[in-house]
């Protein structure tokens, strides 16, 4: 069982109210997922601190750049056997999550969530009452809100339905305080027992409405199709009926995990955006014309035969970001932004770097695209610079060894 930092819910730091993100003290990879390690502590932090440090500290890179750099160690096995990470790359991925947390792709893409109704009964003087309690979550901007509705049937004729629910272990003695927890299972609409004629069942269909990053429009899906992949601890048979916590709540993070494949695919989206920024507006595109085909393949190819709408893709990743107003300790009011996910925050960092005059370049060592304010910068990271310097040094030593003492060559 993981624990929650007691300072999380009592913090008075205004900044943590505006652009916070969540991370555990330790992560691990298990069964194809990245998830908090046993006993890890959940805390909030501000990802913009690391971004500001990259602006003021030499050789420090912004968080989005370190995410893209992780892709260097990711290998796909031939023959469709799936994704394999080298042990060192696995360690780097876990270390990155320890610093920044999970990306939050699911809460970024989800628009609304309707849980399966919970069935409860209460013995009244005039007979039993069957109550259906339904919870829903919906996102407005970067905030997740919760609504609930209850519907009661006091007809004695509901006894048959109650008996069926009781036999299936899905009928609970009325204790509405339990609905704040996640220990109850609901009853999906398709599994709801038939009520007697004349008793309406005004229960909304359970499931999630998603706005996927690389799709147009909204998709309404059952929990078991996409949503369930992010909750590996919930069994397949319980995914539709499970009472999921409100997104971005501490209880949500206790259960949430990101498939490694999804995490890597999202990092590839960031690399594609940086890559197309380079292809369209990089200062050395002419030098790389002979590699255009190779770079197009590396950065996702053309879209319908045309260059990608890279700024539109960047805006989609920022989507859901909303203005927020807060009052500081001196009583002054400020307007800033609240982000629905770490994805949105990282995308906004790219936009901010572009606005401030940083230009796209391509690392001469590893072909990773990056943004820089220094026109002479040739490498995306200190590691790549050191690797290139070591290679040049070894090359010079080899040349020196083949030289004769009088300066001639052997």
Image (cartoon, helix red, strand yellow):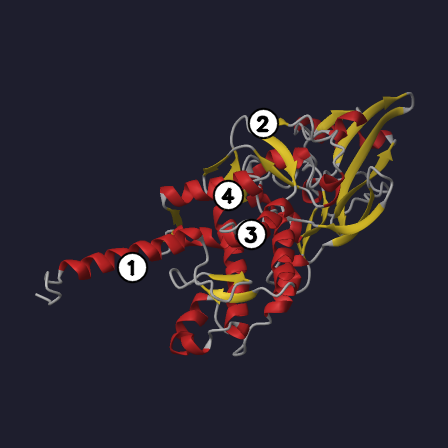
Q: CA distance from mark 2 to mark 4?
A: 19 Å
Residue at far right of view: 126
- Residue in the picture at 36% in, 45% down: 86
In the rendered image, which quarter contains the C terminus?
bottom left
Contact between labelled residues 2 and 3, with CB atoms less than 8 Å apart: no
Q: Earlier along the polypeptide chain: callout 4 or callout 1?
A: 4
Q: Residues within 10 Å of mark 3 (few under 14, many from 20)?
A: many
Q: CA distance from mark 4 to mark 1?
A: 30 Å
Contact between labelled residues 1 and 4, with CB atoms less than 8 Å apart: no
**Can you tell which mark lies on residue 62?**
3
Q: Earlier along the polypeptide chain: callout 2 or callout 4?
A: 2
Query: Toward which corner of the image does residue 3 lie, by quadrant?
Result: top right
Q: CA distance from mark 2 to mark 1?
A: 48 Å
Q: CA distance from mark 3 to mark 2?
A: 29 Å
Kindly identify which residue carries mark 2.
Answer: 2
Name the spot of residue 265 as percent of width and height, x first: 50, 55
In the rendered image, which quarter contains the N terminus?
top right
Kindly identify which residue carries mark 4.
Answer: 96
- Residue in the picture at 14% in, 58% down: 401
Question: Residue 210: in sight, yes or no?
Answer: yes
Q: Earlier along the polypeptide chain: callout 4 or callout 3?
A: 3
Residue at far left of view: 410
Query: Toward which corner of the image does residue 76 lie, by quadrant?
Result: bottom left
User: Helix, strand or loop at disc 2?
Assistant: loop
Contact between labelled residues 4 and 2, with CB atoms less than 8 Å apart: no
- Residue in the picture at 51% in, 31% down: 37
């Amino acid at each position: 069982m993981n624990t929650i930092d007691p300072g999380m819910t009592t913090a008075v730091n205004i900044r943590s109210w505006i652009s916070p993100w969540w991370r555990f003290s330790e992560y691990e990879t298990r069964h194809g997922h990245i998830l908090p390690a046993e006993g890890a502590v959940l805390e909030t932090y501000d990802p913009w601190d690391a971004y500001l440090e990259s602006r003021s500290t030499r050789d420090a890179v912004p968080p989005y750049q370190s995410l893209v750099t992780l892709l260097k160690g990711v290998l796909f096995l031939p023959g469709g056997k799936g994704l394999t990470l080298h042990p060192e790359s696995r360690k780097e991925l876990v270390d990155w999550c320890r610093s920044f947390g999970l990306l939050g792709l699911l809460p970024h893409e989800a628009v609304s969530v309707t849980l399966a109704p919970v069935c409860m009964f209460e013995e009244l003087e005039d007979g039993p009452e069957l109550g259906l309690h339904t919870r829903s979550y919906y996102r407005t901007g970067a905030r997740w809100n919760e609504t609930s509705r209850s519907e009661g049937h006091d007809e004695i004729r509901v006894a048959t339905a109650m008996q069926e629910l009781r036999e299936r272990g899905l009928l609970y003695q009325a204790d509405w305080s339990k609905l704040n927890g996640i220990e109850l299972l609901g009853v999906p609409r398709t599994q709801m027992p038939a009520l007697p004629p004349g008793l309406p069942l005004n229960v909304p269909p359970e499931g999630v409405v998603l706005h996927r990053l690389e799709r147009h429009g909204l998709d309404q899906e059952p929990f078991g199709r996409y949503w369930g992949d992010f909750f590996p601890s919930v069994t397949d048979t319980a995914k539709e009926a499970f009472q999921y916590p409100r997104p971005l709540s501490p209880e949500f993070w206790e259960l949430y995990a990101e498939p490694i494949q999804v995490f890597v695919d999202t990092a590839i989206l960031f690399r594609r955006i940086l890559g197309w920024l380079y292809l369209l507006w990089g200062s050395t595109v002419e030098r790389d014309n002979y590699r255009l085909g190779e770079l197009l393949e590396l950065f996702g190819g053309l879209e319908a035969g045309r260059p990608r709408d890279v700024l539109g893709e960047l805006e989609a990743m920022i989507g859901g970001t909303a203005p927020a107003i807060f009052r500081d300790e001196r009583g002054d009011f400020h307007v800033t932004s609240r982000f629905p996910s770490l994805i949105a925050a990282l995308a906004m960092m790219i936009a901010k770097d572009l606005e401030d005059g940083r230009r796209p370049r391509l690392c001469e060592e590893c072909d990773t695209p990056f943004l820089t304010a220094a026109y002479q910068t040739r490498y995306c990271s200190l590691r790549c610079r050191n690797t290139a310097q070591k290679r040049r040094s070894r090359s010079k030593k080899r040349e020196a060894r083949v030289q004769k003492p009088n300066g001639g060559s052997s």
